[in-house]
């Protein structure tokens, strides 16, 4: 890559020390991500995907290796980074309305300006009419939309998503995938999507990082050469899509078989 | 005091770690999410404390005071002033009811979201 990458991870390793000894979650992960690139990360379950995300977001320090964001090493949580967490019912605040949840990251902006910006974010995810609803009054899919609105409200440069659609039903998932692809393209966001769903990663990403089973390392980087804008039905029906699918499934299958 | 403290400590320990993560990536102080999250427990503790406080007040007046409602009730009983005794008891009951009603009003204001979510009837 000619330009300097926005995100650069080198040799990240992280172990968890528990009562029964240490578990090496990730062994050695390194990659670079260019500004505006949509990167998908897939791997078998329990391979430390979430740990990787927490290290990238600055929520945890890796034991070895380093993460650089915009040319500077990540020590705290960079201001231009935001995260969509896996479970909306653990990340949305039940005591705040949808609008106030979305306004939370920009609460220092002042009430009027902040609300305007939060409304704009809610509009983008199609929830303009639900601003005053509390999370429990919304369906699961709608709650995750609120979480997405909250993640984009501050106009971050780097959006991290941790299995954002794992706890919604298949149809809602398809809708949210399409929505996310559209929004992030509109905003020109750099996105890193962690998922166990290979199809989802291929559909959404420009490049897919395939991780091995724990302790994980990068098995391969697969550039996804599918045209944009992508369509939930048409893109998935393409022969090329099926080829990517087959290739990545084989990769992960062979890595698990070695255990 | 103690019910509030114990409920508060317990609830703080049980605060959803996800809320704290969101606070951290939003560069907010942890307290800004911990306080609202433990508020229902604090209020529940306060409700218990309120009952205990009222009971303790009357009992201590009965035992060791020369004025107050508890003193009045006991004194009336000992002097066979039955009407006065019942009057005292009724006043005491009304007092308890009033304090609880006032408390519920406050609770409704600060914890409306919680009551709605749990399907708790208003009032």
Image: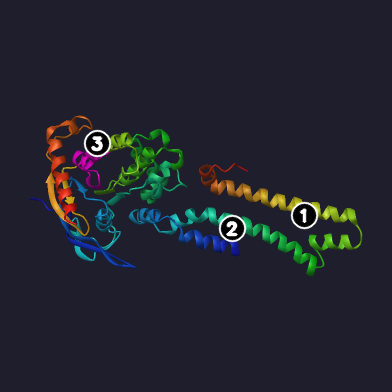
What residue is at 67 percent from the left and 48 percent from the top?
B101
Q: Which residue does the numbered mark 3 point to in the structure image?
A: A182
Check disc 1 and report its element: helix, strand or loop. Answer: helix
Q: In the figure, is residue B4 to the left or right of A223? A: right
Residue beneath disc 2:
B45
What residue occupies the far bottom of the structure in this picture?
B64
Foreground residue, B30 or A155? B30
Colouring convention used in this rendered image of the protein? rainbow
Q: Find residue A76 and report its horizontal and vertical position in percent.
A: 28, 61
Please state the chain letter of the residue tagged with numbered disc 2 in the rendered image: B
User: In the image, is A169 to the left or to the right of A137?
Assistant: left
Answer yes or no: are tags 2 and 1 on the same subunit.
Answer: yes
Dot 3: what SS?
helix
Q: Earlier in the sequence, mark 2 or mark 1?
A: 2
Give the CA separation, mark 2 to mark 1: 22 Å
Pinpoint the chain carrying mark 3. Answer: A
Which stretch is magenta?
A180-204
The percent coordinates of residue A168 (x first, y second) are 34, 40
**In the image, what residue occupies the spot 91% across and 62% down?**
B79
Q: Main secondary structure of the magenta part?
A: helix
The percent position of residue A13, horizontal first and vertical second, equals 21, 62
* Quadrant in which the C terminus of chain A appears: bottom left
CB under 8 Å between discs 2 and 1: no
């Amino acid at each position: 890559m000619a330009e300097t990458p926005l995100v650069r991870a080198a040799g990240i390793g992280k172990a968890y020390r528990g009562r029964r000894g240490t578990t090496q979650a990730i062994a050695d992960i390194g990659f670079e991500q260019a500004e505006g690139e949509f990167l998908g990360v897939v791997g078998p379950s329990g391979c430390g995907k979430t740990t990787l995300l927490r290290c990238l977001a600055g929520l945890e320090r890796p034991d070895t290796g380093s993460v650089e964001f915009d040319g500077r090493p990540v020590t705290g949580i960079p201001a231009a980074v935001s995260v969509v967490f896996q479970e909306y019912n653990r990340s949305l605040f039940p005591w705040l309305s949808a609008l106030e949840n979305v306004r939370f990251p920009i609460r220092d902006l002042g009430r009027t300006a902040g609300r305007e910006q939060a409304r704009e974010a809610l509009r983008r995810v199609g929830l303009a009419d639900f601003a005053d609803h509390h999370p429990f009054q919304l369906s699961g899919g709608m709650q995750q939309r609120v979480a997405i609105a909250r993640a984009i409200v501050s106009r971050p440069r780097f959006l991290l998503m941790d299995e954002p659609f794992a706890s919604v039903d298949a149809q809602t998932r398809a809708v949210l995938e399409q929505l996310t692809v559209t929004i992030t393209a509109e905003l020109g966001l750099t996105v890193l999507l962690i998922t166990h769903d290979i199809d989802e990663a291929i559909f959404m990403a420009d490049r897919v990082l395939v991780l091995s089973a724990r302790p994980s390392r990068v098995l391969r980087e697969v550039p996804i050469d599918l045209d944009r804008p992508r369509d939930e039905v048409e893109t998935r029906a393409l022969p090329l899509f099926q080829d990517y699918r087959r290739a990545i499934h084989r990769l992960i299958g062979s890595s698990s078989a070695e255990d | 005091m103690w019910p509030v403290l114990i409920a508060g400590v317990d609830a703080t320990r049980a605060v959803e770690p996800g809320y704290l993560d969101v606070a951290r990536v939003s560069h907010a102080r942890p307290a800004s999410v911990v306080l609202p999250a433990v508020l229902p427990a604090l209020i529940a503790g306060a409700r218990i404390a309120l009952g205990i406080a009222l009971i303790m007040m009357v009992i201590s007046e009965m035992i060791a005071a020369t004025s107050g409602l508890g003193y009045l009730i006991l004194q009336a009983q000992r002097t066979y002033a039955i009407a006065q005794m019942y009057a005292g008891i009724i006043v005491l009951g009304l007092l308890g009811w009033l304090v609880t009603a006032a408390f519920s009003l406050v609770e409704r204001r600060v914890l409306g979201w919680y009551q709605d979510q749990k399907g708790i009837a208003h009032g």
